[in-house]
């Protein structure tokens, strides 16, 4: 089989309804966060920290009948236990929805390696690691810094900007597009792909399938272009990569590229936006980072801890009891790493943002075998984004009276962040 043959007739296949367990969409208001939670609720998006604190005190593992049944642990200990337990929990789907994918999707999953189970996961993840070493990430810092400066240049003469949509969003979009070798003129599409994948889980199955198909077909178009015109980027690397002595299956190549595009953009976009939101609200921290650039390294880690954007999910593989929670096969389990990072049993002054916190073993990049392979890249983007902003815009604050919005779902970050400059 030649490389061309693998992708010539390959196409997006609609799921067979008979293979999916579908559940009624329940999108009404939450009645009790302990028994009826929804991470898609606007109140959850706005007040997640307060909700986690409340649940830790009265119901550390919440339950809901939404999404066909799901659990929400809120302590570091419980989140860690589930993240490390690959015997009772599968990663074959990591975004909670109103259906369950076929059991035989494991151990590969739709977007390997994050959707993969052992032992396949280890080898699929190992394939990606060379692209995300500190040395390779460092090569991208110069262009990332220059791009951040170009975004700030566009603010000239203005005293009001949206730091989420005019700054934070564009940085990971450009970085990921460059890594994958995608046309920069296509970057507006990426925002749509990301929001459809992560914030559209309560749409109808038909709508979900249509948006997934659009993303898949775009990725396949890029793969075929790279087959015809190879270049030195991550897409060509994946096309040529081998596993167990053979080229990767087409679905593996496409799925990994979808993972890099979606996860690589929204997580960092959210982390940059949340950090700027904090500094706009807390002038003492802002002034200190302007005057003492050396503190920015620990500040980046503290922002990652305090405003960790990512909640992953698992499906229960075999019935298991955790505390008082009797989890049944095929229940969803959310892994809110941000809640774990706010657990006072794990972190001293967990509810405070201490920008020079020195001991900070946070879980912003996950726990267990699925810890983020791109953590060096995310750290670089966040550090450079803050460096450039603070050096160029030392005086800024939240725009008084302007609307601000946090994203709902498993990635939490500002989607509207009006900032007054000066």
Image (cartoon, grey):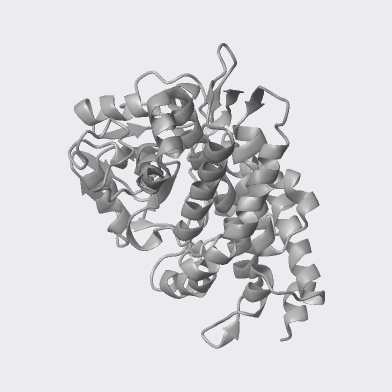
The quadrant of the picture occupied by the C terminus is top right
- Whole-percent x and y of residue 375? 45, 57
The quadrant of the picture occupied by the N terminus is bottom right
Residue sitting nearer the eye, 375 or 107: 375
| Residue 319 in view of the camera | no
- Whole-percent x and y of residue 363? 33, 49
| Residue 264 in view of the camera | yes
Residue sitting nearer the eye, 126 or 359: 359
Residue sitting nearer the eye, 118 or 171: 171
Residue sitting nearer the eye, 299 or 117: 299
Q: In which image quadrant can residue 216 be found?
A: bottom right
Q: How many marks?
A: 0
| Residue 246 relative to residue 133: left or right | right
Residue at the spot 73% in from the left edge and 26% down from the top edge? 157
Toward the front, the furthest residue is 291
- Above or below 139: residue 259: above
Toward the top, the furthest residue is 401
| Residue 367 relative to residue 237: left or right | left
- Above or below 376: residue 22: above
Residue at the spot 53% in from the left edge and 51% down from the top edge? 381
- Whole-percent x and y of residue 260? 58, 58
């Amino acid at each position: 089989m030649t490389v061309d043959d693998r992708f010539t007739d390959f196409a997006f296949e609609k799921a067979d309804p008979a293979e999916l367990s579908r559940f009624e969409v329940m999108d009404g208001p939450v009645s009790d966060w302990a028994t009826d939670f929804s991470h898609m609720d606007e109140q959850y998006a706005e007040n997640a920290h307060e909700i986690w604190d409340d649940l830790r005190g009265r119901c550390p593992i919440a339950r809901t009948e939404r999404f066909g049944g799901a659990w929400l642990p809120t302590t570091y200990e419980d989140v860690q236990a589930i993240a490390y337990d690959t015997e009772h929990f599968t990663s074959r789907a990591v975004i909670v929805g109103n259906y369950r994918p076929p059991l035989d999707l494991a151990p590969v999953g739709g977007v390997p390696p994050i959707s993969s189970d052992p032992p396949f996961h280890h080898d699929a993840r190992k394939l990606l690691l060379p692209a995300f070493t500190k040395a390779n990430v460092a090569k991208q810092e110069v262009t990332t810094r220059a791009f951040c400066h170009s975004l700030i240049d566009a603010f000239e003469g203005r005293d009001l900007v949206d730091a989420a949509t005019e700054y934070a969003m564009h940085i990971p979009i450009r970085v990921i597009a460059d890594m994958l070798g995608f046309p920069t003129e296509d970057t507006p599409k990426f925002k749509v792909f990301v929001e459809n994948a992560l914030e559209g889980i309560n749409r109808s199955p038909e709508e979900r399938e249509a948006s997934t198909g659009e993303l898949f077909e775009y990725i396949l178009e890029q793969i075929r272009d790279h087959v015809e015109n190879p270049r030195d980027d991550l897409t060509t690397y994946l096309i040529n990569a081998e596993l167990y002595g053979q080229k990767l299956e087409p679905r593996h190549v496409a799925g990994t590229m979808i993972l890099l595009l979606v996860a690589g953009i929204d997580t960092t976009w959210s982390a940059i936006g949340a950090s700027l939101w904090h500094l706009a609200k807390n002038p003492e921290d802002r002034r200190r980072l302007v005057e003492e650039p050396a503190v920015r390294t620990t500040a980046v880690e503290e922002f990652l801890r305090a405003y960790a954007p990512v909640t992953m999910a698992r499906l229960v593989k075999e019935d298991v009891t955790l505390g008082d929670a009797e989890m049944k096969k095929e229940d969803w389990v959310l892994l809110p790493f941000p809640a774990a990072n706010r657990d006072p049993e794990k972190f001293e002054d967990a509810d405070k943002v201490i920008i020079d916190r020195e001991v900070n073993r946070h879980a912003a990049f996950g726990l267990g075998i699925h810890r983020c392979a791109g953590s060096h890249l995310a750290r670089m983007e966040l550090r450079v984004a803050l460096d450039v902003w603070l050096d160029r815009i030392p005086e800024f604050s939240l725009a008084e009276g302007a609307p601000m919005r946090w994203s709902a779902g498993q990635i939490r970050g500002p989607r509207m962040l009006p900032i007054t400059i000066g």
